[in-house]
Amino acid sequence: MRLVDGALAIRDDLPTASTVLVDVPLEAGESQGTKVARFSSLQLVRDRQALALSRLDDWALTIGGDCGVELASISHVADSQEVAVLWFDAHPDLNTPESSPSAAFTGMVLRTLIGDGEPGLVPAHPIAPGRILLVGARSFDDAESDYAASAGIRSFTPDEATVDALVAAIEASGATSVYVHVDLDVLDPAEFGGIGYPEPFGVETTALTGLIRGVRERFALAGAGITEFAPADAAQAADDLPTILRIIGALTA
């Protein structure tokens, strides 16, 4: 419910005429024999998002909810573009249904987009591991670390992430556009409180917006997502929303 409150708080600060609301089912959904919790609801939300995205003429900024909303949004651009994914997130979300300690899809999203996931969720056009850049990830499960190393996925700590380094990695991947995913827990919890799973030593807001602007100067933006805003109460939401609006400004300016 904190994620619901967070998404609605962001929506209230966005232009109504430019916002499309995708309904999320109130029921939890069923695993349907898979190892993914709420599998049936995940499929339903993915399909509703895909329909909404298909009706837009320009790139879209997706507001979550958790990182699961990126399944439809990134699949949508991967169908038609040579796209790299900048995954700004404290967690790499590279588990499979078999390796996940929780069965929560939010920790499997990126691995599913690569093509290693529950068949009913894997996209038609997976993202190549070489076109994924993890930025700010600092909490890996062992299985995620092993996979990232074996697949050759580039990872940049908050200290290593510079515009030049990201641009060089995108150029080396052969991508012509970028999708920017921002899980707000990539930020340092000392300056952003409304997150459910804070990890210390994160990226500062000024650094994050600078990286986004720097990459956008060199590559077309295919789409973007902001996820995991989970304020504890209205006061915390009010404190954090200016930071989120700065990130949206970097994406849309």
Image: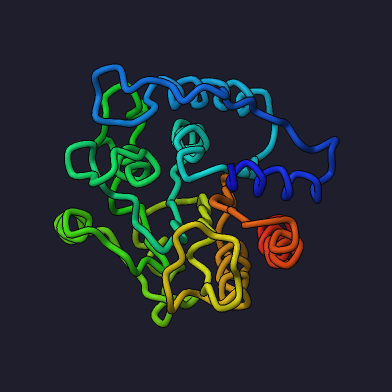
Query: Which image quadrant for residue 130?
Result: bottom left
Left or right: 123 in relation to 28: left
In the image, 218 versus 73, the foreground residue is 73
Residue 188: horizontal and vertical position, in percent?
Answer: 51, 74
Residue 37: horizontal and vertical position, in percent?
Answer: 34, 31
In the image, 157 versus 191, the foreground residue is 191
Tell me the colour scheme of the image. rainbow
> Is residue 171 in view?
no
63 versus 189 height, above or below = above
Residue closest to the far front: 233
Residue 35: horizontal and vertical position, in percent?
Answer: 24, 30
- Total marks placed: 0
In the image, 22 versus 219, the foreground residue is 22
Residue 51: horizontal and vertical position, in percent?
Answer: 59, 20
In the image, 152 versus 199, the foreground residue is 199
Residue at 35% x, 45% y: name it. 110
